[in-house]
């Protein structure tokens, strides 16, 4: 049973500027494992944090490439869930809406969200690890990882690994959207990874009402105005119905 406190209903009803930050938890109900969940099968013996680094790619390029190839296949076989669809509906309710995601699975765009800032890159884009050219196709069955046609360095997924800079323009847009919003949602993220984890605090400093949606407490929980404890795919449709009388496709 999801209970939305009535002062929050009023705040949302009046809000003109809403910013949302999502993490892996929003895709969990689509069947995409979260980052800090135990992994399954072949990947159970690796911690994702240890694979998502430039050092891991330098030392074990085939292992890291194969992990991303497995994830691409997994994500290609799943669909956006009710939480992704609810955020598409939310975007239609307010004049100024920004969706910031740490996810690389592309499910927000597949659901139909328009203004999406993909802070940590995109699983289905590939670039050269040296000259950084975007690469759309390569010869399968050759070397793993495949190599760049220009400089022969390994290709890599176009995602942001630990120790790498986030795309500057995207981060600036995300910071501005956090600073200027009236309501900021943090949904399905453990709030452990920076600079994304700083964004709710930027929103708080700007005077926003910060709302967290997560089945588990996080380091952010003590600072937010409202915690809606539960799965995003359950909480968000209830919220959309309660505030805007909007039905979310399941
Ligand atoms: C549900 C649910 C349901 C389940 N509904 N919820 C300041 C302080 C300390 C350290 C740093 C700092 N600033 C920078 C750093 C270093 C580092 C960092 O943050 N380290 C921390 C771990 C301490 N950051 C960086 O290196 C970043 N770069 C940077 O800062 O550059 C500047 C710089 C450069 C050089 C030197 C110094 C500075 C880059 C970070 C890149 C992160 N990349 C990854 C991989 C992306 C590609 C890929 O996917 O493979 O991004 S790591 C991984 O974590 C991935 C995620 O986007 C990210 C966040 O994870 P997320 O989404 O929160 O997932 P989980 O699994 O942690 O949580 C899921 C949550 O969902 C849980 O809470 C569940 O309860 C919940 N949940 N089911 C709702 N149904
Ligand atoms: Zn190259």
Image (tube, grey):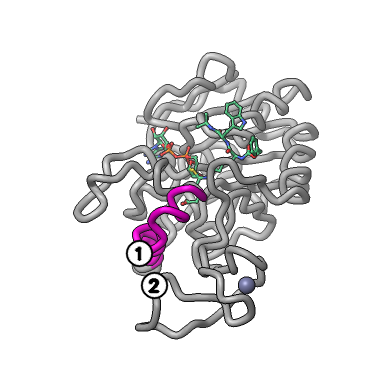
Q: Residue at x 59, y 68 (%)?
A: 127
Q: Which residue is at the front of the view, 248 or 189?
A: 189
Q: Which residue is at the front of the view, 81 or 118?
A: 118
**Quarter of the picture holding the C terminus:** bottom left
Q: Give the quadrant of residue 244.
A: top right
**Up-down relation of residue 65 to residue 169 (above or below):** below
Q: Residue 23: in sight, yes or no?
A: yes
Identify residue for label 1.
66
User: Which of pointers 1 and 2 lies earlier in the amino acid sequence?
Assistant: 1
Magenta-highlighted residues: 54-72
For residue 144, the mark is: 2
Mark 1 vs 2: CB contact within 8 A? yes
Q: Position of residue 223 (x, y in %)?
A: 58, 16
Name the front one of labels 1 and 2.
2
Name the side, left or right, on which 131 lies relative to 157.
Answer: right
* 62 in magenta: yes
**Quarter of the picture holding the N terminus:** top left
Q: Where is residue 217 in the image (x, y as percent from the top left)?
A: 42, 22
Question: Which corner quadrant of the figure contains ligand 2?
Answer: bottom right
């Amino acid at each position: 049973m999801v209970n939305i406190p009535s002062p929050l209903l009023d705040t949302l009803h009046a809000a003109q500027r809403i910013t949302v930050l999502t993490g892996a938890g929003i895709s969990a109900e689509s069947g995409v494992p979260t980052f800090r969940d135990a992994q399954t099968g072949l990947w159970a013996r690796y911690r994702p944090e240890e694979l998502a680094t430039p050092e891991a790619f330098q030392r074990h390029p085939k292992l890291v490439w194969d992990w991303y190839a497995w994830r691409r296949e997994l994500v290609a076989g799943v669909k956006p869930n009710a939480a992704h669809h609810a955020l598409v509906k939310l975007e239609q309710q307010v004049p100024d809406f920004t969706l910031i995601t740490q996810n690389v699975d592309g499910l927000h765009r597949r659901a139909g969200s328009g203004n999406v800032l993909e802070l940590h890159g995109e699983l289905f884009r590939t670039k050269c690890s040296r000259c950084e050219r975007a690469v759309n196709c390569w010869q399968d069955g050759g070397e793993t990882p495949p190599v760049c046609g220009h400089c022969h360095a390994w290709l890599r997924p176009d995602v942001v690994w630990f120790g790498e800079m986030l795309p500057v323009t995207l981060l600036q847009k995300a910071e501005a959207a956090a600073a200027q919003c009236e309501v900021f949602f943090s949904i399905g993220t453990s709030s452990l990874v920076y600079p994304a984890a700083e964004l709710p605090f930027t929103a708080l400093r700007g005077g926003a009402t910060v709302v967290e949606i997560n089945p588990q407490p996080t380091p952010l929980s003590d600072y937010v105005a409202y915690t809606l404890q539960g799965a995003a795919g359950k909480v968000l449709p209830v919220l959309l119905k309660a505030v805007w009388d909007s039905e979310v496709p399941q």
